């Protein structure tokens, strides 16, 4: 074989490019649907057979392609989206490379039929993977474009061997349609598989219709357990809106995470890190949050020309975007208290959102709870309940509850009693607080409470653990991070880039209680550390913080390490299982839950309570049926 340099044939060049753009049938659907959206289509239909390998037909009612432009549409680097470098630096369209149709036509039998707004008739162009001149012929077609692709990879059998089963390829293809349907609520989508309509999505122009579309694509469980960012957060030209799942509605895998930047679905480690950090205090270990979020910003501030698939982006102000996303989601989660959630923390929703393995982990943690006789917790008697002599108290009236609350000041000086103090005995139902009034203690572990809608079952240890933890965090933040000088300063050998970051961000370390100074070109010395972390491996912690700063522009590892210590202290300082509580103590705990941030989950991400409405209870006993 000659080693002389030579030009590749256009067909081979297109097939090489197709290896980057066309990975499977789903890739074809993504590229063509993006073109349809860019063309201003309002109705888009997708028909597939055999998972898209045999046939993919996509119709739209967009502005169409002029007769003169049809041959160019199948050429590489031919596009109407950009004309100069300035356009590339602020891309507002989904497509812009001009490679999709050329790549698809090189590995399939492609027919492109289109009629533009200004033409009286439609025209068609065909390509069958050969190096041939495209010929335009007349056709019958309404305004818009139809792209028909048959026999994917028919001329590259090696690539075809890498395709999965028909069902697997269809699932990937359906996921692409879901993403684009979530990105544009104003468009109508239809997906048919093997001549059967799977999705028929009408335009969703209201909040209720948007939620209905999300429910049809992701399941009703998501929207029933989602918090809406209905008041869109805006700062520094950034706008974030959408839906985030409750921490108790988490998944074993990251399969319900949709993040759009200016309408484009992306997978970005900076965004994922910011969202994960916002859920840090409330998400169960190993679980993944669910969200459908939309970030809008100036196209000039984000570079989408990073990867051929356009799934990755690069933000010009990465640190600003990271902090904005984190603060917005963190605030929404923190401000959600019992009675303020968009959805019920019901038994059915929890079972829907949590898999069996996590339930087994809950049970294992329950066994480790302290035995009767513990003196930690809310105070009062430490003896266990004698169930043989136990009599369930009657449902308390508002007047009786007021009497029970009389001694709360001594028991819990920090408890919130504003709601209780405003109770009106003449209208008990309207004045029942969100967490209701305690009726009894169940097996020394749960508190049974009656609400206006039904009943609530509270895990008293988990609930008290969150309350104590949030109070400790507030106290810690108000006192500030006190530093402690090290008897023997710790010297770290780092890369020059990490040392530069440590020197540039020395003020950040100082605010966090660290004194980090540069000693040489590739070394720093740690002279002071926060008091709470005096016994920790500070060298490893500083290395991790610098690594985060290098990748994400910021780090929360120091706060997370302190919070882990506070969480451990809160866990040991909370009321334990088999502690008998009086009704005033139980009601005090319920009132504190209503006033505490993130009280729907304990420090480990477990739910602190579940509720059942009267309708759900009636169904259990077949009442009214």
Image (cartoon, rainbow, N blue to C red):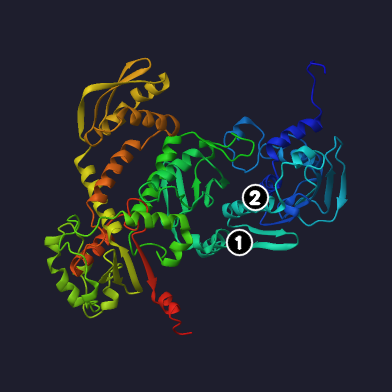
In the rendered structure, the answer to whether residue 185 lies left or right of residue 156 reads: left
Q: What residue does disc 2 label?
A: 172
Instruction: State the residue lying farthest toward the front.
Output: 388
Q: Dot 1, how many residues are within 10 Å of its Cα: few (below 14), some (14-19), or many (20+)?
A: some
* CB-based contact (under 8 Å), mark 1 and mark 2: no
Q: Position of residue 189 (x, y in %)?
A: 65, 58
Label 1: which residue?
203
Residue 230 seen in the current view: no
Name the residue nearer the viewer: 352 or 321. 352
User: Residue reaching furthest bottom?
Assistant: 624
Frontmost residue, 300 versus 507: 507
Residue 24 place in picture, x, y as percent: 70, 44
Task: Tell how many labels.
Answer: 2
Q: Quadrant of residue 12?
A: top right
Going from N to C along the chain, the mark reached first, 1 or 2, is 2
- Is 516 rendered above or below residue 125? above
Mark 1 or 2: in front is: 2
Residue 20 x %, y % = 68, 36
Disc 2 crowd, CA 10 A, few/some/many (<14, 14-19, 20+): some
Q: In this rendering, is residue 24 above or below 220?
A: above
Q: Secondary structure at mark 1?
A: loop
- Residue at 27% x, 50% y is 571
Which quadrant is home to the N terminus?
A: top right
Residue situated in front as seen by the camera: 240 or 384? 384
Q: Name the disc covering residue 380, or none.
A: none
Q: Dot 2: what SS?
A: helix
Among the 4 quarters of the image, the one containing residue 71: top right
């Amino acid at each position: 074989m000659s080693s002389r340099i030579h030009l590749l044939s256009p067909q081979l060049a297109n097939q090489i490019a197709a290896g980057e753009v066309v990975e499977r049938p789903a890739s074809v659907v993504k590229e063509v649907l993006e073109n349809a959206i860019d063309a201003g289509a309002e109705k888009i239909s997708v028909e597939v057979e055999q998972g898209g390998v045999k046939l993919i037909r996509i119709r739209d009612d967009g502005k169409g392609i002029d007769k003169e432009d049809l041959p160019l549409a199948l050429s590489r680097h031919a596009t109407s989206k950009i004309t100069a470098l300035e356009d590339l630096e602020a891309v507002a369209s989904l497509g812009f490379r001009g490679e999709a149709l050329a790549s698809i036509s090189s590995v399939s039998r492609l027919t492109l039929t289109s009629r533009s707004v200004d033409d009286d008739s439609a025209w068609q162009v065909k390509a069958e993977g050969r190096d041939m001149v495209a010929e335009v012929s007349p056709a019958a077609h309404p305004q818009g474009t139809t792209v028909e692709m048959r026999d994917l990879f028919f001329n590259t059998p090696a690539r075809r061997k890498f395709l999965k089963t028909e069902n697997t390829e269809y699932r990937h293809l359906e996921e692409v349609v879901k993403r684009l349907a979530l990105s544009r609520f104003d468009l109508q989508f239809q997906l048919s598989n093997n001549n059967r309509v799977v999705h028929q999505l009408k335009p969703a122009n209201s909040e209720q219709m948007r939620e209905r579309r999300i429910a049809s694509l992701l399941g009703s469980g998501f929207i029933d357990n989602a918090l809406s960012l209905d008041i869109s957060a805006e700062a520094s030209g950034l706008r974030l809106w959408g839906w985030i799942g409750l921490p108790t509605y988490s998944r074993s895998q990251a399969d319900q995470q949709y993040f759009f930047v200016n309408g484009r679905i992306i997978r970005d480690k900076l965004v994922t890190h910011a969202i994960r950090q916002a859920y840090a205090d409330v998400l169960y270990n190993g679980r993944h949050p669910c969200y459908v979020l939309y970030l809008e910003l100036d196209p000039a501030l984000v570079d989408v020309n990073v990867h051929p698939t356009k799934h990755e982006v690069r933000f010009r102000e990465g640190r600003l975007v990271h902090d904005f996303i984190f603060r917005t989601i963190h605030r929404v989660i923190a401000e959600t208290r019992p009675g303020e959630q968009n959805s019920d923390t019901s038994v059915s929703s929890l079972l829907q959102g949590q898999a069996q393995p996590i339930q087994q982990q809950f049970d294992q943690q329950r066994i480790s709870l302290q035995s009767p006789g513990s003196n930690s917790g809310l105070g009062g008697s430490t003896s266990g309940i004698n169930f043989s002599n136990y009599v369930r108290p009657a449902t308390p009236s508002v007047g009786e509850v007021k009497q029970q609350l009389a001694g709360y000041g001594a028991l819990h000086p920090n408890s919130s009693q504003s709601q209780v103090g405003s109770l009106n005995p003449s209208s008990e139902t309207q004045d029942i607080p969100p967490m209701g009034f305690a009726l009894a203690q169940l097996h020394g572990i749960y508190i049974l409470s009656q609400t206006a809608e039904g009943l609530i079952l509270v895990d008293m240890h988990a609930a008290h653990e969150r309350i104590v933890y949030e109070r400790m965090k507030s106290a810690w933040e108000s006192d500030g991070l006190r530093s402690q000088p090290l008897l023997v300063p710790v010297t770290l050998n780092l890369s020059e880039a990490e040392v530069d970051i440590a020197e540039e961000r020395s003020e950040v370390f100082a605010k966090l209680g660290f004194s980090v100074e540069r000693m040489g070109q590739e070394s720093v010395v740690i002279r002071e550390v926060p008091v709470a972390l005096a016994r920790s491996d500070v060298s490893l912690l500083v290395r991790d913080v610098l690594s985060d700063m290098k990748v994400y522009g910021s780090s929360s590892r120091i706060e997370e390490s302190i919070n882990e210590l506070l969480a451990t202290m809160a866990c040991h300082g909370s009321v334990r299982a088999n502690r008998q509580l009086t009704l005033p103590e139980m009601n005090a705990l319920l009132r504190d839950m209503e006033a505490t941030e993130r009280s729907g989950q304990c420090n480990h991400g477990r739910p602190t309570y579940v509720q059942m409405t009267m309708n759900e209870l009636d169904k259990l006993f077949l009442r009214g049926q």
